[in-house]
Image (spheres, rainbow, N blue to C red):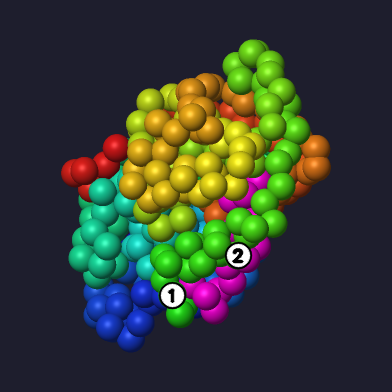
């Protein structure tokens, strides 16, 4: 019996999906209401002998389940399956899963597992894992501008509205970076540490990224005139922003970021910290059920 942890507030969790899940004899449904409840549900699943747990939700729900698995040292014995029911579904996209959660169900429950990298994040003495990406600066401002009501009403376009709201108040950050021991200080508006290719509902922030290459993609958007930054944003929508002169890209195993003023970072889209951040890639640390197009 495979436990399915359903986020009832996720946009694509509807009566049809719940009915399909309810008619399957090989799954059990739970609806945790708090982050702590997700963690406990994962641990309880492991204690009951389950070798796989499936989450029905968005990137934030996947983030909770992955952190529960990794923090409890369950990654060697438990596979994570995903039913993409959120606004962004960025990890599911990189895993090559169908957009429709019902179409993704068989793969989530029975599909082959593959190992992917994760980002181990350390900030303020606290460790958290990001499966898809950690982003700070302008990305954090967009996250603050987008609430659940916006996501429900506008879907992925909510992120574009959030960007339009945050852009006029965009300030730069004097940012000290240590990338695999190479130190530099830059004026940045955005720093993205990417494991997957996309963020914010399919925006290709790191087109060359692979989930299992043992490297994170480090993307820095440098301070510039507002029209130039807007042009870089347009390139992001087109999937070509790494070619813009204000955007730099490299890969790394370990990155340390510290900025003035403090840069607000999210982990898999969940706002987390404005303290200095250290990120380390952990190769093959999580087993997930992916599709044939996974990369």
Tell me the number on the disc at residue 165.
2
Q: Which of 257/132 is in front?
A: 257
**Left or right placement of residue 179 versus residue 57 in this view:** right
Q: Position of residue 125 (x, y in %)?
A: 79, 38
Q: How many marks?
A: 2
| Residue 179 part of the magenta segment | no
| Residue 123 seen from this side | no
Which secondary structure is most common in the magenta stretch? helix
How many neighbours does mark 1 have within 10 angstroms: few (below 14), some (14-19), or many (20 or more)? Answer: some
* Residue at x 49%, y 23% (from the top left corner): 250
Q: Which residues are magenta?
A: 136-151
* Residue sitting at x 68%, y 19%: 184
Whichever of labels 1 and 2 marks the residue nearer the N terminus, that label is 1
Picture quadrant of residue 134: top right
Looking at the image, residue 108 lies above or below residue 240: below
Residue furthest to the top: 182
Q: Nearer the viewer, residue 282 or 161?
A: 161
Outermost bottom residue:
15
Report, in whole angstroms, how far the alpha carbon at label 1 lies from the one at label 2: 15 Å
């Amino acid at each position: 019996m495979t436990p399915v942890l359903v986020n009832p507030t996720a946009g694509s969790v509807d009566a049809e999906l719940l009915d399909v899940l309810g008619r399957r004899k090989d799954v059990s449904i739970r609806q945790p209401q708090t982050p702590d409840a997700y963690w406990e549900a994962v641990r309880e699943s492991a204690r009951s002998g389950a070798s796989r747990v499936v989450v029905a939700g968005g990137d934030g729900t996947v983030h909770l389940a992955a952190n529960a698995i990794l923090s409890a040292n369950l990654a060697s014995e438990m596979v994570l399956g995903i039913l993409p029911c959120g606004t962004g579904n960025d990890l599911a996209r990189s895993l090559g899963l169908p957009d429709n959660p019902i179409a993704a169900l068989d793969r989530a429950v029975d599909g082959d597992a593959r190992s992917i990298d994760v980002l181990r994040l350390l900030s303020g003495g606290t460790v958290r894992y990001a499966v898809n990406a950690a982003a700070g600066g302008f990305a954090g401002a967009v996250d603050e501008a987008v609430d659940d009501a916006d996501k429900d009403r506008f879907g992925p376009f909510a992120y574009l509205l959030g960007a339009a709201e945050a852009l006029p108040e965009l300030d730069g950050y004097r940012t000290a970076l240590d990338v695999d021991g190479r130190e530099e200080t830059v004026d940045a508006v955005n720093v993205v540490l990417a494991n997957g290719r996309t963020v914010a509902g399919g925006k290709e922030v790191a087109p060359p990224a692979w989930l299992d290459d043992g490297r994170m993609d480090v993307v820095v958007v440098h301070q510039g005139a507002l029209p130039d930054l807007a042009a870089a944003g347009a390139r992001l929508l087109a999937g070509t922003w790494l070619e813009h002169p204000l955007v730099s890209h490299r890969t790394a195993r370990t990155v340390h970021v510290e900025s003035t003023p403090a840069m607000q970072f999210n982990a898999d889209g969940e706002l987390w910290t404005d303290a200095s951040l250290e990120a380390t890639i952990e190769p093959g640390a999580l087993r997930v059920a992916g599709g044939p197009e996974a990369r």
